[in-house]
Amino acid sequence: MSSRTRNLETALRQAVTDGLLGEERPVAGFVDVRGVRDSVAGLHAAFAGVPDVLHAFAAKACPLVPVLRLLADAGTGCEVASPGETRLALDAGFAPERIVLDSPAKTRAEIREALALGIALNADNLAELERIDALRPAGSASVIGLRVNPQVGEGSIGAMSTATPHSKFGVALRDEGARERIVDAFARRPWLTRLHAHVGSQGCPLPLIAEGLATLHGLAQEIDARVGRRRVTSLDLGGGLPVNFADDTVTPTYDDYVAALTAAEPALLDGRYQVVTEFGRSLLAKNGFTAAVVEYVKDAGGRRVALTHAGAQVATRTVFMPESWPLRVSAYGPDGTPKRGPRVPQDIAGPLCFGGDVVAHERPLPELAEGDLVVLHDTGAYYFSAPWAYNSLPRPAVYGFLAEDDGSAAFVTVRPAQSVREVSEESGLAQADALLTGFAAPPPP
Ligand SMILES: *Cc1c(COP(=O)(O)O)cnc(C)c1O
């Protein structure tokens, strides 16, 4: 058994003992604190040969303030893409100069705030650069970059691919006249010093990512040559290292990533350019799991169905795109010990009111019974931390854990479970009468 599975099972048993999972608390997310630190250490080690590097964790992969603060403590920066994520990063304690703002549709207010605080930002397009021209205070400390789309093609998941010919992100580099326009943009702006590209996330093979980033490096050299002086001082290499969801093995590794980049462009990481990375999923996915109680089991059309409390509210992508986002599911007894016995194909369904709310179809597992637990593996990024509010299901609690070799585990609350009262409050409770009597007074601006 891998140490990851051993820690998971230690945490699961202890969570049941401590009452964090059970009839009253039918679903929760768990983050392996030591695992997160180990993953960050592995990232730093892989880039140890690069003189100046900032690893900006992509906040959307796990937008939880205590997790972000853990990452800040472990030495990462933070990549953010909305006013909410910027707030989380600041509240987590990231220094503004270690925050990179990549919102695809930045408002003037968002740009103004970033420039005032000294947060780095990457303009998505040339029109955004013109807004920055107008808004940038003379002494702004913000590093400013331009996002380009190297248009190297798509990976196996279209929605996760950002370097396709028609991607909504960045300046499309292969479009006619684009290189000239980009060079001109840098020539006219001494404060524009960074190039950014994010080739894609899950499903994008390493060689495709490396090809896109090698293109970025070539563009930086072309800009410097054509402007006639050093303009580009840093390259922001995006994120997107794919995660293996099939078993506990971490593959590809950050070492593989560095090797692929170096193979595609030997000078990419040689220190001429400061480097920024923006990994999200690869840092957190395998350091988290979701556990849920089996409420009922039944048979339907000759198939066994387990109705659990983990469905599309915590595994949205998996439910809607099961081929692209398959998850490993394991079966445990009510006490959190592994279920034994012959494997029977079972649908692992969730609690939402639509027929497709199934996280695993005909999955061979020891036969589940009421009160058992199911675990969704590798869900530390983009799953319980990004819940979906369908059916007014409350956001589940998230716990951080430290599992010990003696079989015990300690927990802290990362995010408390949302109460049904809070669900109502965020659904307009304070405005309950608005549609009956509210028109007498106009709404506040
Ligand atoms: C989502 C995103 C990332 C992180 O991608 P992962 O696949 O989670 O590593 C990095 N950079 C940008 C610009 C992103 O949008």
Image (cartoon, rainbow, N blue to C red):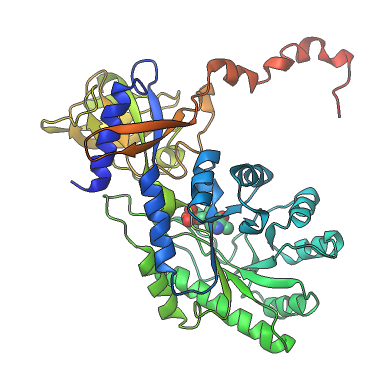
How many numbered circles are shown? 0
399 to the left or right of 16: right
* Viewer-nearest residue: 166 or 251: 251
Res. 237 visible in picture: no
> To which quarter of the image does residue 303 belong?
top left
Residue at image position (64%, 53%) is 95
In this view, 90 is above or below 430: below
List x then y, in percent, for residue 300: 26, 23
330 to the left or right of 194: left
In this view, 33 is above or below 343: below
* Viewer-nearest residue: 91 or 310: 91
List x then y, in percent, for residue 159: 50, 53
Res. 73 visible in picture: yes
Residue at image position (51%, 71%) is 152
401 to the left or right of 76: left
In this view, 8 is above or below 18: below
Residue at image position (36%, 48%) is 35
Image quadrant occupied by the C terminus: top right
In this view, 227 is above or below 155: below
* Viewer-nearest residue: 208 or 247: 247
Residue at image position (27%, 50%) is 248
List x then y, in percent, for residue 32: 37, 42
> To which quarter of the image does residue 292 belong?
top left
List x then y, in percent, for residue 404: 27, 39
> To which quarter of the image does residue 91 belong?
top right
247 to the left or right of 389: left
